[in-house]
Image (spheres, rainbow, N blue to C red):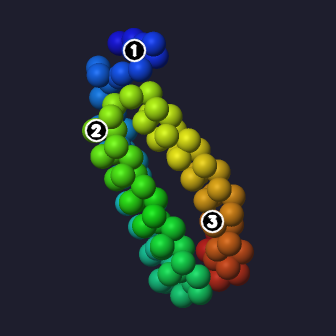
Amino acid sequence: MSLLYTDNKFDNTDVNPIFKELINYADEHFGIEEYYFNLYSYQKKDQHIELHNSYRQKVEELKKSYENDNSAKTLFAISNFLYDWWIWHINHADKDYTDYFHANGLK
């Protein structure tokens, strides 16, 4: 399968497995984090869960956007969102709870 940027369409590209994986990953990964937020009474759990929910919502929005316009522009929007999310979320939001969990014995 080759993708032609000159056509600016990806008609033969099935990105549904990618969206399914992003949603499954979020459910599993965020579920584990949220379990520990509750277990250790993490003070910022509500704010962090809001971030998780915004990720879930954005993935759904991007999925719908791709279903309506399966162009390179939409694929790049997906790529940019994921890059920004993972870099920022892991390096900032997730770092907030690391010390708290370690102090409570979770390694």
Comes first in the chain, label 2 or label 3: 2
| Left or right of 98 in this view: 9 | left
| Left or right of 54 in this view: 64 | left
Percent x, y of residue 58 = 42, 55
Comes first in the chain, label 2 or label 1: 1
User: Is 24 in front, or is 77?
Assistant: 77
The label number, if any, that marks residue 61 in the structure image: none
Q: Which residue is mark 3?
A: 94
In space, the residues marked 2 and 1 are separated at their CA atoms by 16 Å
Residue visible at 28% across and 38% down in the picture: 68
Percent x, y of residue 52 = 47, 66
- For the C terminus, the quadrant is bottom right
* Amino acid type indicated by mark 1: Asp
Percent x, y of residue 44 = 59, 82
The local secondary structure at tag 2 comes to: helix
Q: Residues within 10 Å of mark 3 (few under 14, many from 20)?
A: few
